Image (cartoon, coloured by chain):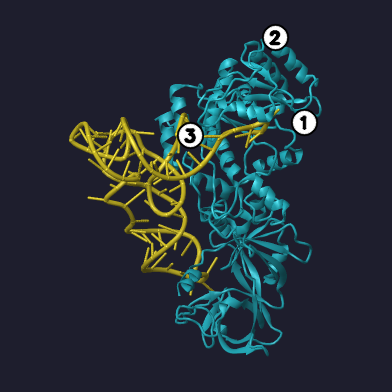
Chain colours: A cyan, B yellow
Amino acid sequence: MDNNSPKVEESIIKERKASNFIRSLIIEDNKTGKWGNRVHTRFPPEPNGYLHIGHAKSICLNFGMAQEFGGITNLRFDDTNPVKEDIEYVDAIMEDVKWLGFDWEDRLFYASDYFDRLYELACELIKKGKAFVCELNPEEMREYRGTLTQAGKNSPFRDRTPEENLDIFVKMKNGEYPDGSKVLRAKIDMSHPNIVMRDPVIYRIRRAHHHRTGDKWCIYPMYDFTHCISDSLENITHSLCTLEFENNRPLYDWFLDELNLYHPQQTEFARLNLNYTVMSKRKLLQLVQEGYVNGWDDPRMPTICGLRRRGYTPESIRNFAEMIGVAKSESIVEFGQLEFAIRDHLNKVAPRVMAVLNPLKVSITNYPENQSEFLEAVNNPEDETQGTRQVPFTKELYIEKDDFMEDPPKKFFRLSPGSEVRLRYAYIIRCDEVVKDDNGEIVELRCTYFPETKSGNQTEGRKVKSTIHWVSAENAVDAEVRIYEQLFMVENPNDTSEGKSFTDYINPDSLKIIKNAKLEPSLTAAKIGDKYQFERLGYFCVDYDSKGNNPVFNRTVTLKDTWAKISNRA
RNA sequence: UGGGACGUCGCCAAGUGGUAAGGCAGCGGGUUUUGGGUCCGCCAUUCGUAGGUUCGAAUCCUACCGUCCCAGCCA
């Protein structure tokens, strides 16, 4: 039996995951031999901002499809606009792509690598009579372009001879004209129903220092001209981009056809939108610059570095990308889908640990003074190989404030006066007495423990409704814990129909800092970036703000909370 | 209103003429020393609307409705 036949491979792929139209397209291309079974994609970011979860979708698509079909992917910086771009972004982007788990090997490119070739090709276009130098100023150019419903007018410079055009273009390159005084335009059709085809600009004069080519050039090519040719020069097969470039595809095709170059296929897919957040680089930049968040990697940001700092894993993001699929219809994915992906992964890998966020002191009245003992706790019930650890138990403990109610509702299973609960990995206790301060605040619980109920003992007949977590007061490690909520209070902050700005919807409580959380002592060993499940609370990771004896944890995501759901119903 | 695209369950999304996959969310139950996890079950007679073709339509045709993109010397 031939297990390597394309048919078998195809069916395996189909079984493994839902198909999408790009996968189908590649399968079809391989069937017809359109690219000789090659799959060569590229991820082409402009280095003018940080990558976000939307880019992650594109990265996973481009690298993922190539991987799946035995192809390769280039990383190419689309750096044709030096006034917006910066080396800082180049480095950050490479770090993020690598972190996501993808490898461009030796195929790191820059559109600026092709500036010489691009210039030659522009000259070729001029010689063919397919491009001309235009001296209309921006306002005039807009007028001549026409509108959505009206055809444009030909530029008065449109009929210059190829010789004249070439002569001026060379002088443009040589810096003989001031910035913005002239542009090179493709000569297509000013009455084309698609505005993109109305003699688009392909070169502009711009004396700006380029992060790679320095001051070599004073003219820079436009996206439409650069992108298709870069794809062509790199031998790309499938040029995947987002829907807003659909209008530009005829131009992509036009340049390659006119110049008679190898011609990749551009295919557009819908970009990712997530509710309760914003995704545009402009808005993300505004959040950073106006101080709504603390930088690009603020854990509330949907940037890759923000998610990384929040505690998301590359696996979870890749999985998320696969889950949401790829299609052409614009959609807004629920944030909960991303949260599912990170819980799903962390559940399998994160060690469990006990931590009390809002401590309430518990004294075990019948536990001997000055006694302590170590109790064995399982590190991860999902993964036996993670072993066990010893947790100290003492007379004075902390439990979570939320785990006690003086006057509990019917379905409250935790501690209340006279009730019993199990302390995780330890004993069953009963609450005998509630101690309050002068303000009536509960400051301490006095409880009895039952030595025979020690964890691991056979304690049949002793059923308790719930198990709560705790930390030995004597051995607790103090920590700062940062609790994050959605940055926006509305599902779609981009909706400005009420005359509001997206910043009007910012959640004032998106960050709550807990200064005096109590952690079990094993956490002294935690290193920056380490991820844990704080039992019953959620997943947390060590932030790089941690210093020596002052660890800082970020809450990545809560655990699913059925109790919250029940109590909210009431 | 010119051109280009898209409308399948609350949210994603398969399906490409043979009688609506899957995931998330939700709901019900078993198990559980995390109200976590896990397991089982339920969750679109219907595919934007209206007609038409066909033995048979989410899939083909026609019209209509709705949403998005395009008038940067941005990408």
The structure residue drawn at horizontal position 64% and vertical position 64%, both measured from the top left corner, is A508
Which residue carries the number 1 mark?
A212
Which residue carries the number 2 mark?
A163
Quadrant housing the N terminus of chain A: top left
Q: Is residue A230 left or right of residue B65?
A: right
Q: Is residue A102 left or right of residue A332?
A: right
The structure residue drawn at horizontal position 77% and vertical position 17%, both measured from the top left corner, is A171
Q: Are dots 2 and 1 on a single chain?
A: yes
- Badge 3 crowding class, 10 Å Cα cut-off, few under 14, some 14 to 19, many 20 or more, is some
Which chain letter matches label 3? A
Name above or below for residue A282 compared with residue A171: below
Which chain letter matches label 2? A
Relative depth, front residue between A134 and B49: A134
Q: Is residue A431 left or right of residue A84?
A: left
The structure residue drawn at horizontal position 55% and vertical position 17%, both measured from the top left corner, is A257
Relative depth, front residue between A492 and A529: A492
Q: CA distance from mark 2 to mark 1?
A: 31 Å
Report whether residue A328 is seen.
yes
Name above or below for residue A82 compared with residue A233: below
Q: Amino acid at mark 2?
A: Glu
Which residue carries the number 3 mark?
A22
* Front of the two marks 2 and 3: 2
Name above or below for residue A246 compared with residue A199: below
Name above or below for residue A442 compared with residue A62: below
- Badge 1 crowding class, 10 Å Cα cut-off, few under 14, some 14 to 19, many 20 or more, is some
Relative depth, front residue between A142 and A500: A142
Q: Give residue A416's position: percent from left, percent from top.
A: 53, 84
